[in-house]
Amino acid sequence: MSASHIQVPAQGAKITVNADFSLNVPDRPIIPFIEGDGTGVDITPVMRAVLDAAVAKAYAGRRQIEWMEVYAGEKAVKVYGNDTWLPDETVQAARDYVVSIKGPLTTPTSGGIRSLNVALRQLLDLYVCLRPVRYFTGVPSPVKAPEKVDMVIFRENTEDIYAGVEWEAGSAEVKKVIEFLQKEMGVKKIRFPETSAIGIKPVSIEGSERLIRKAIQYAIDNGRKSVTLVHKGNIMKFTEGGFKKWGYELAVREFGGEPIDGGPWVKLPEKFGGIVVKDVIADAFLQQILLRPEDYDVIATLNLNGDYISDALAAEVGGIGIAPGANLSDSVAMFEATHGTAPKYAGQDYVNPGSIILSGEMMLRHMGWTEAADLIIKGMDGAIRAKAVTYDFARLMDGAKQVKCSEFGQEIVRHM
Ligand SMILES: NC(=O)C1=CN([C@@H]2O[C@H](COP(=O)(O)OP(=O)(O)OC[C@H]3O[C@@H](n4cnc5c(N)ncnc54)[C@H](OP(=O)(O)O)[C@@H]3O)[C@@H](O)[C@H]2O)C=CC1
Ligand SMILES: O=C(O)CCC(=O)C(=O)O
Ligand SMILES: [Mg+2]
């Protein structure tokens, strides 16, 4: 166990969770934050400044966030040494302090460490990756009617191919797995058994149901029209097809849904808003979100589909520079940007901090600090309407004034 490097603020108190999972939020909550790798150094301080300004303005000093830095990624290795990418005390702090926020963390491709982002989600059982996709007037978009894009993605966050159960081509382990599949399971369809890598895709009834239940409940609570189960169940019949099947069964069993025209679509009773639960195959979905985005509302999907879908939908409403997200368990919440570390821009005060700021806005709303959250939306809207924007928007907007990452934060505060 390495020494502690977390400095707990002298002032402030922990957020706590009641038995019904509601939160007790003190006026000075201690919020752990991970700065993040790459552009984390640029965007995270801007997010903190914008949230502090919104809270100060909304509550005139009565409330204040006490930020507590915790470490992960490259900064953790610098602070803790010993190749410590994800210190135990970081995970423990996220659990103990209930609500936290993080910048992006690097994951090398092919070899090297496995994703710290995925590790955090798994260790804290943050099974919902919630990514709302909404349009701000004036944001440049490649689609004709971006204002029709208004979806909320519920991405399963702990299973699927992201579980990291895979073996490298040529390894002794993969030979063993292939031999088992061929000899014990009668598998004859591995095209090149001598040179295959193998990955395993666990998808469970429990994991699917808890995610879909949250998506349906969200649709009910927020007056949404439909929940679409997005899957590739025609090809992966028992994993992705299972997700679809269990989703419909849950809608009928737990929410009293009735099949529409004999099914498989289901309509919930009027007391649940008459919400329609439907499904679509993932490839068709990816073209329909370009052609008919108004047909889709709340989306429930598996981990890999959700990863692809969230970046694709973000691009329709201004790109991953402003797409926010939250990782949620029943009690713990960790908010984070949708994008990655964008290493080529690191340390240049250049990129759009909007994604982590809007993740912070979600965090304030989650804490019940609605007035401060509303100010952030107002400030963001005002800055975009004034066309004082970072490079990603400026390059696509006529008459825009390009500002730095930190200046965009100041513009948001000015327009609150
Ligand atoms: N949750 C997390 O922590 C995540 C981490 N990652 C990790 O990040 C690293 C880099 O991944 P990569 O695939 O390059 O994806 P990135 O999301 O980091 O960057 C891809 C492109 O997206 C645009 N972009 C990213 N961030 C911003 C921003 N804040 N403002 C405006 N535009 C932005 C840039 O486009 P342009 O070139 O057009 O300017 C950038 O080149 C990898 O190690 C990956 O594993 C990836 C996703 C999520
Ligand atoms: O963990 C990573 O590096 C990538 C994660 C990712 O793409 C996401 O969370 O959307
Ligand atoms: Mg992603």
Image: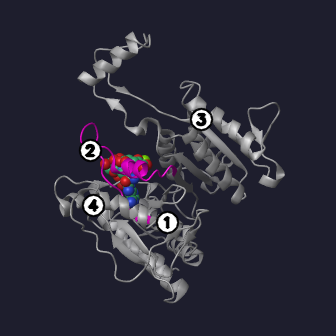
> Marks 4/2: CA distance?
21 Å
Instruction: Please say which color scheme the image uses.
Output: one colour
Q: Nearer the viewer, residue 84 or 318?
A: 84
Q: Picture coordinates of residue 71 (x, y %)?
A: 29, 62
Residue receiving disc 1: 358
**What residue is shown at x 28% (from left), y 57% (from top)?**
87
Helix, strand or loop for disc 4: loop
Q: Nearer the viewer, residue 208 or 169?
A: 208
Region rendered in magenta:
100-128
Sequence order check, earlier mark of 3 and 1? 3
Task: Determine whether, in the image, residue 171 is placed left or right of residue 336.
Answer: left
Q: Picture coordinates of residue 346 (x, y %)?
A: 27, 60
Please state which amino acid type lies under the numbered disc 2: Ile
Residue 411 visible in this rendered orientation of the protein: no
Sequence order check, earlier mark of 3 and 4? 3
Please state which amino acid type lies under the numbered disc 1: Leu
Does residue 5 show up magenta in the picture?
no
Residue receiving disc 4: 346
Helix, strand or loop for disc 2: loop
> Marks 3/1: CA distance?
30 Å
Residue receiving disc 2: 113
Please state which amino acid type lies under the numbered disc 4: Ala
State yes or no: discs 3 and 1 in contact (Cβ < 8 Å).
no
Q: Residues within 10 Å of mark 1 (few under 14, many from 20)?
A: many
